[in-house]
Image: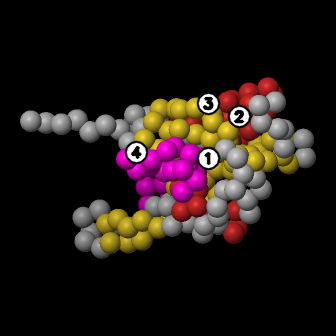
């Protein structure tokens, strides 16, 4: 009997800051050979898979720490869920912060590279991070995650989270 595998659930954090009169967001670029030459439409919020029974906020904080080496201390504001192209559900949160992208230390993953080459290589989970204003973030970000930018702006405009 064939069983269908449920798409994984992830949790993540969209960090934001005020830069002059502009709102900026922190995005990361995935590491590894498949993403090496991709830029526009490839960047993401900091996120990762939730463990069975794990609360989304706990998973989001854990993943942020694992992928940056820096713990998020501020309160998280819910941005809701989105579905990525492959069906994965991502529960996202916003937090104000001003992370130094040069201080980040990503964890690594191993994979056989080149494929069927018999050699296991290690790659950073994220190979770079950058702050983007909202128009640039809209171009850089995965299409399925772009609604999170609009939700962040709505929260700031409504006063649900303080304007940085």
Above or below, 54 against 162 in this view is below
Above or below, 124 against 4 in this view is below
Secondary structure predominantly adopted by residues drawn in magenta: loop
Task: Check disc 2: other Cα within 10 Å, few if <14, some if 14-19, many if 20+.
Answer: many
| Foreground tag (1 vs 4) | 4
- Label 1 to label 4, Cα distance in Å? 19 Å
Circle 1 residue:
13
Q: Secondary structure at mark 3?
A: helix
The region drawn magenta spans: 33-62
Sequence-wise, the earlier of marks 4 and 3 is 4
| Foreground tag (1 vs 3) | 1
- Label 4 to label 3, Cα distance in Å? 26 Å
Percent x, y of residue 73? 69, 56
Percent x, y of residue 154? 74, 27
Sequence-wise, the earlier of marks 2 and 3 is 3
Circle 3 residue:
147
Circle 2 residue:
152
Q: Which mark is residue 53?
A: 4
Quadrant showing the N terminus: top left
Q: Kindly check if marks 1 and 3 are in contact, taking CB atoms under 8 A apart as contact.
A: no
Above or below, 139 against 112 in this view is above
Residue lying at the far left in this picture: please name it: 1
Sequence-wise, the earlier of marks 1 and 2 is 1
Q: Secondary structure at mark 4?
A: loop
- Please tell me which residue lies in front, 4 or 127: 4
To which quarter of the image does residue 147 belong? top right
């Amino acid at each position: 009997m064939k069983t269908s595998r449920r798409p994984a659930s992830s949790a993540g954090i969209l960090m934001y800051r005020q830069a002059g009169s502009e709102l900026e967001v922190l995005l990361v670029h995935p590491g590894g050979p498949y993403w090496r030459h991709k830029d526009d439409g490839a960047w993401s919020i900091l996120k990762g898979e939730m463990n069975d029974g794990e609360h989304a906020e706990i998973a989001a904080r854990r993943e942020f720490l694992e992928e940056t080496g820096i713990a998020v201390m501020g309160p998280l504001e819910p941005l809701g869920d989105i579905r990525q192209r492959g069906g994965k559900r991502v529960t996202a949160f916003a937090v104000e912060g001003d992370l130094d992208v040069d201080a980040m230390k990503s964890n690594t993953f191993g994979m056989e590279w080149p494929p069927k080459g018999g050699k296991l290589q290690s790659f950073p989970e994220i190979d770079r991070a950058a702050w983007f204003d909202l128009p640039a973030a809209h171009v850089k970000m995965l299409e399925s995650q772009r609604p999170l930018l609009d939700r962040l702006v709505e929260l700031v405009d409504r006063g649900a989270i303080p304007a940085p």
